[in-house]
Structure formats: C-alpha cells, structure tokens
Image: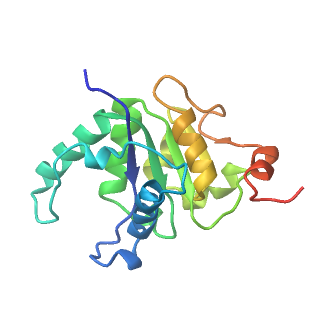
Amino acid sequence: MAYRNGTYIAFHANDTPNPTESDMKYYNTLRMWKVREDSDFSFINSHEKTGSVRDSSQKETLKRSLRERLNNSKNMILIIGNTTNQDTDWVPFEIEHAIDVCKIPIIAAYPAYTSILAPAELSNWWPKALADRINNRTAHVIHIPFKQNPITTAVSQFNFDNYPLGEGLGYYNREAYINWGLVNN
C-alpha cells in the first residue's frame, strides 16, 4: 500500500509552455507560498514525490506517473480557472482516477472568487468528469477560493479518511471567511 500523505495538484495547462498563459501560474503560486519563510502554508507536493515527466514522454508513461502520484496522495487540489472545463485530456483523467480509484477528496479552488457560499452556482466552471461525479454523488468536494488560508485549512482538514460534507457541494460558512479576512462582518 502506498504511503498516502501528499497533496496532488491538478490544473489545465492549456497546451502552452508559457505558465502565465495557463493555470500553471496558480500551481507555481502554491509552490511559492510553501517556500516563503513568513508563511504557515505547508503541504507535501505529490508531484515532487516521483520522478519528473517530460512533456515529450509517451502518453502511457505520463498516465502511469500521474497514477502513481495520485495513489500516494491524501487529497487533490483542483484549480478551476477559466478554461479548466474545456480540458478533455489530463484534468478529466486526474479527476476520474482521484475519485473513482483513490477515493480522495477534491479541494476545488477557484481563482476568480474570494468566497464561495453556494457551490452549485459554479457548475458551469466544472469539468465534465467532476460534474458527473458530483451529480452521481461519488465525489467528495470542498469548494473554496484560491486563497492561502482556505487552501491551508482544507489541505490539513480533508483526506481519504475525512471527507467534506455536502455530497460534492461542500463549502465553508461565512464565519470562516470572516476569520480568514476574506469577507467583512
């Protein structure tokens, strides 16, 4: 059995090597938060637990590596940006394996929001693989803004033994957002 202590991060790369033109910039933000000395942000990055995979690798080699990383993960951060729901390749594969095989919770992080109190209203942002699993109630998802405090809380709180409530539509209440300084009283 794999040692499942990592956090897997999924994002739509838009088939571009330029990270500023894709959601890779948010992945890099997570990595930056992690190394800052003045930050409490901490997680074990599942992508750093296995050897790197080059973009020129064969598709099956990439899938094998992604499966290994997911199998060693306790949860997944799914960065949901403007084009995530258009990805028909890697993000759906990652969602399917995370939910169907690994049974890990999804931390759906939305860069366009500062609070999320009605996640069902964001269904047009969801990739089909996620929407299908939320609708058939096999996904365990907490919907949060892409902000450091909510991500830190969710990563430390949810794993394969502790799922968010809400049958795929989990969210933090208004008081949590007030405590994080993201909304006013």
Direction from residue 95 to residue 144 in the image, left or right: right
Q: Is residue 136 above or below residue 3?
A: below
Q: What colouring does the structure picture have?
A: rainbow
Q: Position of residue 65 (x, y in %)?
A: 19, 45
The image shows residue 109, relative to residue 17, as above or below, that is above
Residue placed furthest toward the right? 185
Q: Seen in the image, is 129 located left or right of residue 169?
A: left
For the N terminus, give its image quadrant: top left
Pick the front one: 141 or 45: 45
Where is 175 relative to 79, above or below?
above
Q: Residue at x 14, y 62 (%)?
A: 54
The structure residue drawn at horizontal position 29% and vertical position 26%, both measured from the top left corner, is 3
Q: Is residue 127 visible?
A: no
Q: Specify the farthest residue to the front.
A: 37
Q: Is residue 39 visible?
A: yes
Determine which quarter of the picture holds residue 6: top left
Quarter of the image where one finds residue 100: top left
State which quadrant residue 38 falls in.
bottom right
- Total numbered labels placed on residues in the image: 0
In this rendering, position of residue 151 left or right of residue 180: left
Q: Tell me the quarter of the image containing the C terminus.
A: bottom right
- Viewer-nearest residue: 115 or 59: 115
Coordinates of residue 12 in the picture (x, y in percent) = 38, 64
Residue 160 picture location, percent across and down: 45, 27
Q: Residue 62 location in percent, x, y? A: 17, 52
Q: Is residue 19 left or right of residue 59?
A: right
Residue drawn at (52%, 49%), measured in percent from left and top?
41
